[in-house]
Amino acid sequence: MQRHIKMHTKNLDFFYGDFQALHEISIDFIQHQVTALIGPSGCGKSTYLRCLNRMNDLISRIRIKGEAMLDTQDIYDPSVDVVTLRRRVGMVFQKPNPFPKSIFENIAYGLKVNGVKDKANITAIVEKSLKQAAIWDEVRDRLNESALGLSGGQQQRLCIARALAVGPEVLLMDEPASALDPIATQKIEELITELSSKLTIIIVTHNMQQAARVSDRTAFFYMGKLIEVNDTDTLFTKPKLKQTEDYITGRFG
Amino acid sequence: MIKQRLIVQKIWFSLLKVAAWVNGLALAVIVYFILSRGWRAVSWGFLTQAPKDSMTAGGILPCIVGTIALCLMTILVALPIGVASAIYLNEYAGHGKFIRFIRLGINNLAGVPSIVFGLFGLAFFCIVLKMGVSIASGGLTLGIMTLPVIIGASEEALKSVPNTYREASLAMGATKWQTIRRVVLPTAFPGIITGSILGISRAAGETAPIMYTGAVFFTPDLPASILDEVMALPYHIYVLATAGTQIEATRHLQYGTALVLIVLIFGMNLSAIIMRSKMRKKLRI
């Protein structure tokens, strides 16, 4: 099977002011695969994730060097429209963050800001997105109720549905299950596996079992450097480096 | 030893409790005082007639209408400018020198005594801009005086909107303005409105800023345009109590007017609180 590289970075450096948070990160993200980014707190994995949809642009005094590509498009090229980029590269956050609006409005939001006006079309996409995020059956009768009335796990799946509604090609997930209980976590993990048939997923996680369960490939970060990246099975069973082995066996971090 | 610590704690808690109760007590005393002396003066005729016989009899309708007109003008001036400033300062502006200068200006504006606002209004709006003593001049003066309050309340409300809402919106391909317009403002709206109404109800009771700019001693006519002068409740009390023809004989009218004024202000505050709780329920914050 032809493995298409959906997104990649090459020698990506990232600076907060004078502090270099990322050193020469080069990773290929293969289409329709799940790539997990693991590593101890402060290793730069979240910073790296936020480089991929340019969420770091919101912070002042940052600097970035190297290459970051979506298909054949350099995402840091001055001609790139960040708004369009973020529609193609969606994001799910650590804490469920639905808007204080109705369930329907939460999903319709992304469509409306992107100029979709046709009501029937919006309704159809809302339903489709909620089904994709495996939450339709739980909310179909209460679409007009506030999203804040849902449980944490439901809220997070709603946020996934919200991200899916604008039709992203890549989905970035920043520890999407870390604020959830084990059952809700399991549902999110099943969902990730299911979504990967249509999307390229990049997930940051603290939980090594989770990385092993959901991902095809895993990248291990430490102190702003990429230590090792490989197929998940290989990385977890036969890590090349001692440092990786120490981390995945729980000897540090 | 443990007993002693518990006693110390008890003493402090009691002191804090007393401090909190003093507020309620002060309000209760004021309300009782005004109510007991003013309620006899208040009647349907008092609310619907103009003053008569050199303001020793009759009602206070022109004052009620005047105060409401000044309030509306204040809202018109202060709400858009205040909310817009708060959005700019909280959502767009950084921490540069110019922004710090603007913030310093706002803080100092809040500290300017109200009589100074009155003199400024007289010099600038009434004389330089030739608006004379009018609802427009008085409302503009009160509006500028209320701006810092509205900016403060609005900024607090905007700050209380979780950053994760902004991030979620931007991550879906919304622009910054769409994010502010569709997510941040609706979430902050209850706080903005409540804070603003509280600020404006404060302005409604002010005397000094309007005594040269909007309110007059006596006019039996109701205003027909915003360039008309008006009577106003706080100024009317001041006039009756210090410069009336029969100060002692009109005491009951003074307290009656004061009663109407505080009822009006409590009404505004109450509506602010009700609006806030209704909107919060809708948003489920």
Image (spheres, grey):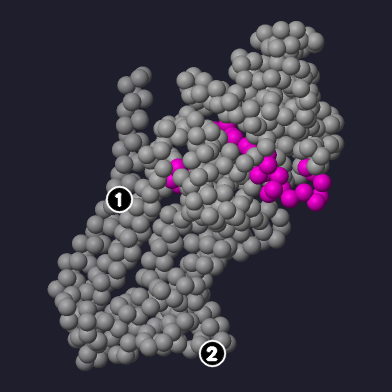
Amino acid at pointer 1: Val
Mark 1: few, some, or many residues within 10 Å (few <14, many ≥20)? Answer: few
Per the rendering, the mark at residue B278 is none
On the image, the x and y values in percent for residue B204 come to 38, 71
Q: Chain of mark 2?
A: B
Task: Give the quadrant of the N terminus of chain A.
Answer: top right
Can you tell which quarter of the image residue A47 is in? top right
For the point 72% across and 42% down, the residue is A54
Task: Give the quadrant of the C terminus of chain A.
Answer: top right
Of tags 2 and 1, which is closer to the observer? 2
Q: Nearer the viewer, residue A36 or A33?
A: A33
Side of B254 where A228 appears, left or right:
right
Mark 2: few, some, or many residues within 10 Å (few <14, many ≥20)? Answer: few
On the image, the x and y values in percent for residue B196 come to 44, 62
State the extent of the magenta-drawn residues as a range. Answer: A75-103
Residue positioned most to the front: A1
For the point 70% across and 12% down, the residue is A233
For the point 78% across and 42% down, the residue is A75
According to the image, label 1 marks what residue? Answer: B22
Side of B250 where A78 appears, left or right:
right
Amino acid at pointer 2: Lys
Identify the secondary structure beneath mark 1. Answer: helix
On the image, the x and y values in percent for residue A204 come to 65, 26
Q: Is residue B156 above or below residue A23?
A: below
Q: Please say whether residue B72 is visible from this viewpoint.
A: yes
According to the image, label 2 marks what residue? Answer: B130
Q: Nearer the viewer, residue B189 or B199?
A: B189
